[in-house]
Amino acid sequence: MKNTVNQSIMPKTAVINENGHLQVGGCDVVDLVEKYGSPLYVYDEETVRSACREYKEAFSAYPDTKILYASKAFLTQAMACIFAQEGLGLDVVSGGEIYTAYKAGFPLERAYFNGNNKSSEELELAIDTGVGRVTVDNFFELALLDSVAKSKETTVKILLRITPGIDVHTHEYIKTGTLDSKFGFDMTQLDEAIELIKEEYSNLELVGLHAHIGSQIFEIAQPYNDLIEVVSKQFALIREKHNIELTEMNVGGGLGITYTQVDNPPSMFELAEVILKAFNKCNEEYKLNSPTLIIEPGRSAICTSGVTLYTVGSAKQVPEGRKYIAVDGGMADNPRPSMYQAKYHAIVANKANETATETVTMAGRYCESGDILIRDIELPETEAGDIICVFNTGAYNYSMASNYNRVPRPAAVIVENANSDIIIERESYDNLICLDKVPQRLSCKKPEGVL
Ligand code: LLP
């Protein structure tokens, strides 16, 4: 792209076209807004597919690796179809994610069901739809899953999630591996859990262990080395104490991505190198029987393929202070800046060749002072109607979006080879009230107005 923006921030197909507009997947984004409205999530199919392929290639040195896409980052039926076609599995964490994948025709034997408080209805749904594995998080769930499996006269293959006691440098809210965590069995509890599986829970078959240390991780060497060491050691101990040869080792997701110009995360290939080196070393050291290696990336598989387009509305210059420009979306379609102080990069998509002349703060439209999408970004001068493209909104944006302030959620389109297709419709006001019920005794006189 003809400007100074770091290319790894944006979808692979992003270019500036002859009109000076940003183009993604061969589609001028200004035309996309005209056609589908604003704000708009745009996903570049080529970037998603190539992330899947790169992950597979990166781990190809160990052919018995399963790559599960962590659906929590972003899942729709169309996306489930893409991951199915690319041969990935899915990490699912709710009945809703299972249902979405099932309805899309995703082969659910490739799905692993994670989560620290799955309900019996969700566990039943997992069994009924043929979800391949359940990763059990705690003692309560062991008992629950066994009773659900018994009621269905079936046996469920399970992994146990452990808390590996590993700290990583990332935001406090997205660390998961430290000992004081709500997720997983403490390692001192594993023996008891396994005894229970052997003695009481006859409808559960233990096949592996799972651990996940956090998300948006940049320093990979030490944490993943430690993680694989810890998990492999447990494999050896379990064989020794319980005479069970585990066959699946899931080391989670977590690879960081480039949100802004200053981020410099390792690549998938570097991650694979670290993981495979540690895995091979531990396989040898603990004489493991070459278990299936499982990784479950979310953000790094999807984030860069997605951008959000907003339209500029009002602006405010604080006398001798900041200049704010307000867009038509904000914290409800992207809660990450207000939740995690996340930083993003953006350009004015219809002025993509123009040089930046001012520093502005991009505010959202929601009724909270904290609804700031990007603080102090340099942009060309903007006016109402300009289209701003925020990069790297593919993961944990739509999936965490809300209807705060009763604003309908934006549409999402997928672009490819100059085609664009809706994958999520824009919500309407009727969608917003479709679940409302007004008890008779509260009912007001219905309006006879314009709507
Ligand atoms: N596996 C497990 C068990 C997880 O909990 C997660 C993410 C993943 C895999 C995928 O991690 P990833 O490759 O995406 O880093 N909402 C936060 C991120 C929460 C991550 C939750 N778990 C954010 O917007 O940054």
Image: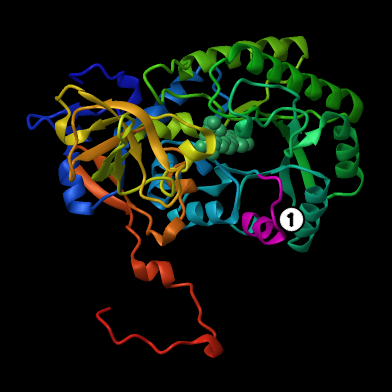
Residue under label 1:
154
Q: Position of residue 144 (x, y in %)?
A: 79, 55
Residue type at tag 1: Thr
In this picture, residue 218 sits left or right of residue 385: right
Q: Residue at x 45, y 53 (%)?
A: 105
Q: Does the stretch in magenta take in 292?
A: no
Taking the spot 43% from the left edge, 47% from the top edge, the residue there is 398
| Vertical comparison of 296 with 71: above or below | above
| Residue positioned 34% across, 85% down in the render | 447
**Residue at 35% of width from left, 67% of height from top?**
429
**Could one spot residue 403 in this view of the protein?**
no
Q: Is residue 121 magenta?
A: yes
Between 374 and 224, which is closer to the camera in this rendering? 374
Q: Quadrant of ligand 1?
A: top right
Q: Residues within 10 Å of mark 1 (few under 14, many from 20)?
A: some
Image quadrant in which the C terminus is located: bottom left
Q: Quadrant of the N terminus?
A: top left
Judged from this view, the residue extending furthest toward the left is 18
Image coordinates for residue 439, horizontal then vertical, percent: 54, 85
Q: Which residues are magenta?
A: 115-126
Q: Secondary structure at mark 1?
A: loop
Describe residue 413's horizontal placement relative to residue 180 as left or right: left
* Image vertical order of residue 67 relative to residue 261, above or below: below
- In the image, 43: left or right of 200? left
Residue 150 lies, in percent from the top left, at: 79, 59
Q: Is residue 330 above or below residue 381?
A: below
Inspect this view and state whether residue 391 appears: yes
Indicate if the residue with disc 1 has its beta carbon within 8 Å of ligand 1.
no
Q: Position of residue 93 (x, y in %)?
A: 60, 47
